Amino acid sequence: MNQEPHIPEAEELPTPSPQEKPNKPPALSQVASSLFDAVEMFAWAVFAVILIFTFALRLCRVDGSSMENTLHDGENLLISDLFYTPRQNDVVVFHLTEPTSPKSLQKTLVKRVIATEGQTVRIDFSTGEIYVDGVLYDDPYRCLKNASGRPTDAYLHTADADYRFTDNPHFDTEANILTATVPEGHVFVMGDNRNWSRDSRDSDIGFVDTRCILGRVLLRLDPFTVFSAD
């Protein structure tokens, strides 16, 4: 009798139990890629900081006592000229471009804007009053000190302060009054320490060209103080 060949049934092989594979070090390309990403992020961060401190923000340091009691010698300031238009009472940092300026003024200066272009300033040195366009200037920042650095209620005579205010072409020596209209594109500035500040009253400085303004003081870093734009 013919018999069909016997085909053995396929046996299922036992599934090997899963074993934990040993951790393999990442491929060299992955390490290089991660390192490149980190370097790229760092480079972009440095680039962003450079852009900000080139076009938006700057750091400067107060040198001298002309802005006491608002600012003091050695304090660090953060300033900005981004979309900036000078306004009255702003504290600004500027430089002088005249080659004839004394060496003591060939540096950045920080002062307060008293009047802007088109406004007329009248300063009575006898009374210490300031008028802008005929209106008494509200002067809460004013600090008056004598030669010993002590508070006083009056302006010092210009000769006593050793500043050449009397050389200003707008100064009336008989009336002891300075009257001037700020030209276009300029501002009239003064230091808050009125008796010991070389500013727009001095013929060596005069009106400040707004193109020479490096920026408005936004804040003082130490002690931390924000200067309002209002």
Image: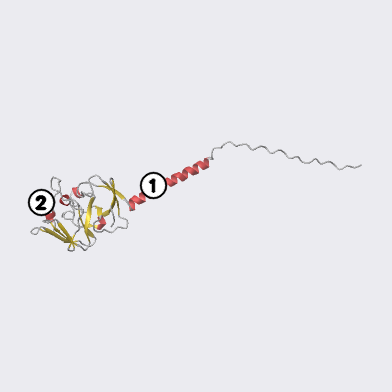
Between residue 45 and residue 226, name the one nearer to us: 226
* Residue denoted by label 2: 159
Q: Position of residue 68 (x, y in %)?
A: 20, 49
Count of numbered badges drawn on the protein:
2
* Residue denoted by label 1: 46
Amino acid type indicated by mark 1: Val
Instruction: Give the quarter of the figure containing the N terminus.
Output: top right
Residue at 41% in and 48% down: 44
Between residue 178 and residue 89, name the one nearer to us: 89
Q: Position of residue 121 (x, y in %)?
A: 17, 60
Residue 216, label in figure: none
Q: CB under 8 Å between callouts 1 and 2?
A: no
Pointer 1 or 2: first along the chain: 1
Q: Residue furthest left?
A: 174
Circle 1 or circle 2, nearest the eye: 2
Amino acid type indicated by mark 2: Ala
Q: Position of residue 142 (x, y in %)?
A: 19, 53
- In the image, is residue 150 above or below residue 177? above
- Circle 2 — which element? helix
Residue at 47% in and 45% down: 37
Between residue 17 and residue 59, name the one nearer to us: 17
On screen, residue 21 versus residue 9, left or right, reads: left
